[in-house]
Image (cartoon, helix red, strand yellow):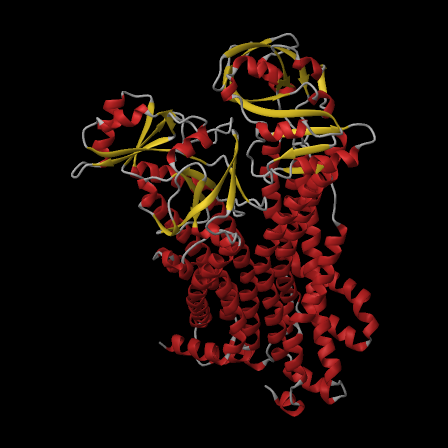
Amino acid sequence: MTVLKTSLRNFLAHKGRMALSAVAVLLSVAFVCGTLVFTDTMGTTFDKLFAATASDVTVSSEDAGADGETSAANGRPRVIPASVVDEVKRADGVKEAEGAVSSTAVTVIDGDRDNLSPTSGAPTVVGSWNSNDARIMDITSGAAPKGSGQIMLDADTAEKHDLGIGDELSVITALGTHTAKISGIADFTVTNPGAAVFYFDTPTAQKVLTGSTGVYTGVNVTAAEGVSDDRLKQNVLAELGGGYKVLTAKETAEANQKDVEGFMNVMKYAMLGFAGIAFLVGIFLIINTFSMLVAQRTREIGLMRAIGSSRRQVNRSVLVEALLLGVVGSVLGVGAGVGLAVGLMKLMGAIGMELSTDDLTVAWTTPAVGLLLGVVVTVLAAYLPARRAGKISPMAALRDAGTPADGRTGRLRAVTGLVLTGGGAAALYLAGAAEKATEGSMWLGLGIVLTLIGFVVIGPVLASGVVRVLGAVLLRVFGPVGRMAERNALRNPRRTGATGAALMIGLALVACLSVVGSSMVASATEELDKVVGTDFIVQDDNGQGVSPEAVAAIKATEGLDRVTEYKWTKADFTTPDGKTGDDTAITATDPTYAVDMRIETVEGKLADAYRPDSMSVHEDYAKDHGITLGSTVDVAFEDGRTGTLTVRAITSSEGAIDAGAMYTSIDTLARYVPKKEIPLTAMVLASAEDGRKDAAYAALKQSMDRFPQYEVRDQTDYKEALKDQIGQLLNMIYGLLALAIVVAILGVVNTLALSVVERTREIGLMRAIGLSRRQLRRMIRMESVVIALFGALLGLGLGLGWGATAQQLLALEGLKVLDIPWPTIAGVFAGSAFVGLFAALVPAFRAGRMNVLNAIATE
């Protein structure tokens, strides 16, 4: 009880000093809990949607996905005969069976030719209005569609794009473009996470989406009263006799959940990873806080030891303070985490993914994990300072607080740090020298961990040298004030090292990712210049193919010299060694592709691969399967027949563009795959006539104006798009890393604030002998800047090493250019100085307001 009372008294006595550490715990716990609540809420939203939309039993094509269709390569959904509906109705236990048609391989545009597809990545669904949809949607305006000239859409999409009854929409599919006017607007009775949904009547949907009125993509089956879904499924299967996919509502929901599970898991674990980085940075803040509090209470602890407190009691007293800090920070963090989750939901709503707070899900495990994590991390971080407190002898009561012994760095630390850093450097060297990316990535991970720990351990040793250099360069120009700032930073290298290490972690990751991102862009740009010999590229950035109608428009554009279609499909290869590889990708293009793309060949000429019944393979595949020029490969095309193709060229397996591709001609593909099953063109390459590039570019853009889903780019546009994509990804990562950097800034603030308290008498004496308030504030600001720049130097140096090694692994995948973004590195370094200035504002202000006599009288 005495230990608890002492801990509570000390905790409350230093509550101001504990506040910043509590904020660090709060932020880290909030990020963890917010991530868990957000992803659990997303899961609940999708669970409710899938459960509401699934009929008791669904019948679809055997090759279809869980939702009744696949993203068929030919742009059409998988279908079943309309006669299946009558067969299903004959099964025992069927109350009702209704055919339905739907497809996601569509684009819908309004009268201004604006694409109505969601920007969040959610699908655009066009289907037939049926009783199953009527269960989850209420028509709030107008009426259900009737006839080919009418279409209905969901209320969310109508609101986003300011659409109303009578407005004209065009539905673009692989079969062509169909125009209709809005007859009605329907609202979901459950939360729609962001899909854009459009409805025709059934005959129109059949014609527009499949090209035939005698087929459906699925049959929705309702069970009679007292018949379970499992029993109904068995009865339907018995009636149909196989050849179809039959799923219960539960199975359909589970299959749909798997489709979104991967996306949610990536988001969840990525965000938790950044929360872990914030926790790691917070550990340094907590260690620093308790180390300085213990140092400042040296005399107090010595007196406690003198009157009978044992080492164990002193140790437990500090740990109980840490426990209180962890509990307070974690409890507040759990509450903040729920608020953060709501904020993330609003943010996702702004970019098109609708999540309702009605579905807010806070599982009991979320606060439990947050509290456990926050408390355990805080107590573990305080363990070393607590041990140090327990070792204080009663004689320490005779000395001033914060004795010089507190600032010594041991030889063991230096040796350990050098060994870890050396081991990490060796691992990074082995990663860079690896011949396979998979092998090198393991060494890279080990090298990052060891060098990071090594720099943390050796930080106090490095602080002495680095701070002196920074002081000589930056501080000496400020005269005596600058020298005092340098000495203050040097007086406790352990503290300076720990404070700088907190900032080092975030900046090391920023520098590493900057190098990797910049190198990827530079490598891809060089590869494009080296390989691409075409002027223009037309494609759908969402991965849907280019429709035949759009391809025809491209080919009809004036000023173009040649147009090359690029398709790909899957096939089962049977090679000369007798092995069969399932679902191997094969690329089918026009023969002009050999001119448009300067693909490196090891043997033969790529142009020969476009001869009838011919193909190319890449070098690694040829070696693995004993293939040489003239070898034959049996190719069983997806949705087609098997053909025997002769290998006429062997291409290099390296390169960032089309690495590992195997080519054949579109004519050869058409020989073995029925016309209806031939995949859509994935990309179209076009080259202008000599001297007409600008005119052809303008004409091509005009030709594609009625197809807003496709992007028309020249090589410059393509490079910029690539740069923007990587830049957006990096900016998102930098945003998540900002949490760790904020916690690091709190660490600098806390270190300076406690340092000012520790030096109260010293500050009073300096003020008494003539140091002005302005000079005092400048001294503290410069000390903060030096600490921040010390952390920045370590972090940027470490990050550059990691990034350069990672680029060596990317070189094995064809991205061979190392590009260091010096402007970004310089900007981060300069920004660190501003971070130091910002962090020192409050401590410097408080120091400047100290009463001189009271400061001198401080014990």
Question: Which residue is located at x 47 percent, y 50 percent?
Answer: 157
Q: Is residue 559 left or right of residue 441?
A: right
Q: Is residue 664 left or right of residue 371?
A: right
Question: Which residue is located at x 51 percent, y 26 percent?
Answer: 74
Residue 512 position, x and y percent, is 66, 48
Is residue 482 visible from the viewing direction of this image?
A: yes
Tell me if residue 97 comes above or below residue 306 in the rendering. Answer: above
Picture quadrant of residue 410: bottom right
Tell me if residue 246 comes above or below residue 389 in the rendering. Answer: above
Is residue 414 visible from the viewing direction of this image?
A: no
Residue 737 position, x and y percent, is 59, 56
Looking at the rendered image, the quarter that the N terminus falls into is bottom left
Residue 491 position, x and y percent, is 69, 70
Residue 87 position, x and y percent, is 26, 24
Looking at the rendered image, the quarter that the C terminus falls into is bottom right
Taking the view exactly as shown, the residue that stands out farthest to the left is 226
Q: Nearer the viewer, residue 437 or 321?
A: 437
Tell me if residue 24 comes above or below residue 152 in the rendering. Answer: below
Question: Which residue is located at x 74 percent, y 77 percent?
Answer: 778
Question: Which residue is located at x 39 percent, y 47 percent?
Answer: 46
Taking the view exactly as shown, the residue that stands out farthest to the bottom is 853
Q: Is residue 165 left or right of residue 133?
A: right
Q: Nearer the viewer, residue 692 or 633?
A: 692
Number of numbered discs present?
A: 0
Picture quadrant of residue 659: top right
